[in-house]
Image (spheres, rainbow, N blue to C red):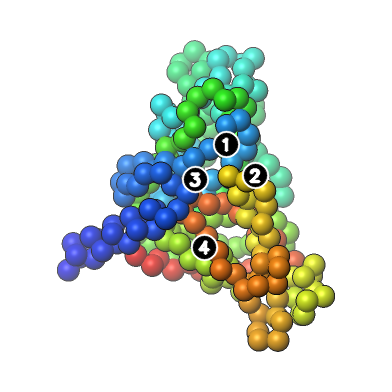
Amino acid sequence: MKKRLLVLAVMAMAASLATADVVSKNVVGYYTVKLNTPGYSMIGINFNSIGGTGIPLQDLFLPSSLYPGEDYEDFDNCDQMIFWDNDSQGFTRFYYVNIGEGPFWYDEGGNPATNKVSPGTAFWFYRPSTNGQEYAKIAGQVDERETIERTFLEGYSMFAKGFPIETLIGQGLAGYPGEGYEDFDNCDRIIVWDNESKAYFTYFYVDLGEGSKWYDESGNLVSKNFLVGMGAWYLNQGTNALEWSENNPL
């Protein structure tokens, strides 16, 4: 029975990946995301180590798919990851550089990064030139936890789906609602960055007379999916933290 459930989970995840902005699919191994070269791409992590302990930053990407800088003077000419700290409301940047011991990820102080990345994390990936591959391969392994718990504090949070299954944007998230069409500026928002068009698309949590629901910029109910590999911003405009328990659908 357990083996059959694992097979069903693999099939479900494969079907999801096939429709996402993801080029290849692996359950344990690497999945491939398309980048803007040069420029910024937002990437969401939907996989993790089985035990939910997170993937070390140094192991997140397949090294052959990265573009390293050479030496300390080359920090501006290498692949970079930029993470948003939801607590301090500020960015932290990491650089992929070879300073004599082979390419590694380094923090802004020039120290090897020791951070781990959890499922549901999103970050900016910056490639400053057209050098290197157009794709990056990210480690993928299905998380076996029943739920992933997260907290969105007041202000901006960067996030992704914790599990590799597509659902409608905003599904399962019930935050601080606006009241009526005039209140689109005074409600929670999900702001999705589209890597292809290099543009933001915003979704609003508003009550237009049928209860609080997610609407797009034209005032239509959300019809777009939160794709595997996609990252986004959540703007919590309420005064309380928003708790989100994301259930494992596999």
Image coordinates of residue 43 in percent, x first then y, are 54, 45
Task: Indicate the secondary structure of the residue bearing disc 3.
Answer: strand
C-alpha distance separating marks 1 and 2: 8 Å
Instruction: Give the residue pinned by disc 3.
Output: 117
Q: Nearer the viewer, mark 4 or mark 3?
A: 4
The answer to whether residue 19 shows anywhere in this view is yes
User: What is the spatial separation of the Cα atoms under label 3 and label 1, in whole angstroms?
Assistant: 22 Å
The mark that comes first in sequence, 3 or 2, is 3
Instruction: Give above or below for 156 relative to 74.
Output: below
> Residue reaching furthest right?
182
Q: Which mark is residue 225?
A: 4
Please give the residue where the numbered disc 2 appears in the rendered image.
198
Amino acid under label 2?
Lys
On the question of residue 111 being in view, the answer is no
* Residue depicted at x 67% and y 52%: 200
CA distance for labels 1 and 4: 21 Å
Q: Residue at x 53, y 38 (%)?
A: 35
Amino acid type shown at disc 3? Val
Find disc 1 in the rendering and name its residue.
36
